[in-house]
Image (cartoon, helix red, strand yellow):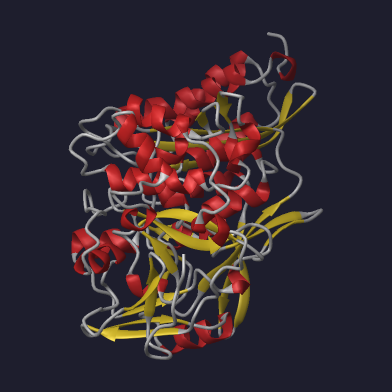
Amino acid sequence: MTTTAPTEAGAAFLTVNGTPVPLGDTTTPHTTTLDWLRDRGLTGSKEGCAEGECGACAVLVARPSGDGGTSTEWVAVNSCLVPVGALDGQEVVTAEGLGTPEQLHPVQRELADRGGSQCGYCTPGFVCAMAAEFYRAGRGERAGHAEEGTGEHAGPCGPNGFELHAVSGNLCRCTGYRPIRDAAYALGEPDESDPLAQRRRARPTPARHTRLLGDGAELVRPVDLAEALVLLAERPDALLLAGSTDVGVEVNLRGARPRLLVAVDRLSELRDLEVGDDEVRIGAGLTLTEVERGLAGRVPLLAQLFPQFASPLIRNGATLGGNLGTASPIGDAAPVLLALDAALVLASSEGERVVDLADYFTGYRESVRRPGELIREVRIPLPLAGTTAFHKVAKRRVDDISSVALAHALDVVDGTVTRARIGLGGVAPTPVRALRTESALVDRPWTRETVEEVAGVLAAEGTPLTDHRASAAYRSAMLGQSLLRLYAEQPRASKEQP
């Protein structure tokens, strides 16, 4: 793949399928990458849901790999959610850029040969999501060992090392998934002459300072955290933008038009991850995929969360800072971090302060975060609890919003519960700790009798409502059942004999 420099120095542009393309005078801060691409004739990507649940809009974006930024990886994201201005200077590949009718890309060829496309509406999105997995570093190391994946790659793994969960954010309504799976499992390794495979060995494109105006709004990408904090102090109405997995839905479906978007996803000060002796520090600007890879299972409760958090397409953009910044009562990360006794570092132009997550939420989508502040870091104290579990109750196994989410973190010493932390989501106006249940467990024997008794206390926690996802009675029942499930799933050796 060859590229040429943009025609106007400093002008906002996107490198699409190897060619720099100016964003153009009609592009506004709210123009999605999907609409921008389609306006330029690249109509393979489609809008199916406009909220990141169907994957028809998926494209590939070049991102820094996990080796310190010396190489690049191809990541699939939902183009319907990301403002194109937030990708200024970046590299994007669409289904049209992967192959041609005369020379299909290996992913396209396998889908065609194995009947993996019928109406074709969703196919370009599948192609891009599958291509990201096709180019994933280390995929071939598991070739020949078909198995169920764990952690980051939960779900079936093909004999070629292809993790089928890579396409769990893509929906197909007419072809059926078997031929798509067959195509995925038939893929070999990228050819050495493949330009996208070669691109992985070079450094990623650095983030550019961006200022995009239009439609009475502005999108700014600061060069560093100091500039971002000064901007937030001057404009407290600014809306922070990372993966745009929440903002994008508001723009697409609810007509939101924030007057100032401040992109913080590439700020180096928000992208550190450190596991120390006393705590784990996670930068609020890291994507969930990056956090999962960086932790590599060292925080088991988070390792259980990630595969159940939306889809890979969403996790490739979503951040802990964004998930907590919205203060949503149904965000899946909050119950887990509550159970982990996490704290947040809030930064502003006046300095930083540390707030326990248990004290962070103040009301429905409200928090103690002040105008001009952003979440810089999440801190998790060590050592971790020995008995943990994350239970998500939803209508679909993956890529769904929780009806109820629970996270348990217990210390059991010599058969007695010495410490308990339980985080709940979906049962109150805010994520909450199950304080009465925690008190009822501490200093009690970890036995079936105790669990059955305290399950009734847990079932009465919160103030669950009836809505289109579940009834209040169902939510309460799932709370109590979760504690019974936790006990039943623990290894026999960790329980006191009844």
Q: Quadrant of residue 219?
A: bottom left
Q: Quadrant of residue 69?
A: bottom right
Q: Position of residue 33 (x, y in %)?
A: 31, 66
Quadrant where the C terminus lies? Answer: top right
- Asked whether, in this view, residue 236 is left or right of residue 81, the answer is right
- Asked whether, in this view, residue 422 is left or right of residue 169, the answer is right
Q: Nearer the viewer, residue 206 or 103?
A: 103
Q: Is residue 418 visible?
A: yes
Q: Is residue 402 visible?
A: no
Q: Nearer the viewer, residue 418 or 118?
A: 118
- Asked whether, in this view, residue 440 is left or right of residue 187, the answer is right
Q: Position of residue 333 (x, y in %)?
A: 50, 48
Q: How many marks?
A: 0
Q: Position of residue 88 (x, y in %)?
A: 41, 76
Q: Residue drawn 29% across and 53% down?
A: 57
Q: Residue drawn 44% across and 47% down?
A: 131
Farthest-out residue, top: 498
Judge whether 411 appears above or below 494 on screen.
below
Q: Position of residue 50 (x, y in %)?
A: 24, 54
Q: Nearer the viewer, residue 61 or 242?
A: 61
Q: Residue drawn 41% across and 49% down?
A: 313
Q: Quadrant of residue 241?
A: bottom left
Farthest-out residue, front: 102
Q: Nearer the viewer, residue 101 or 181?
A: 101
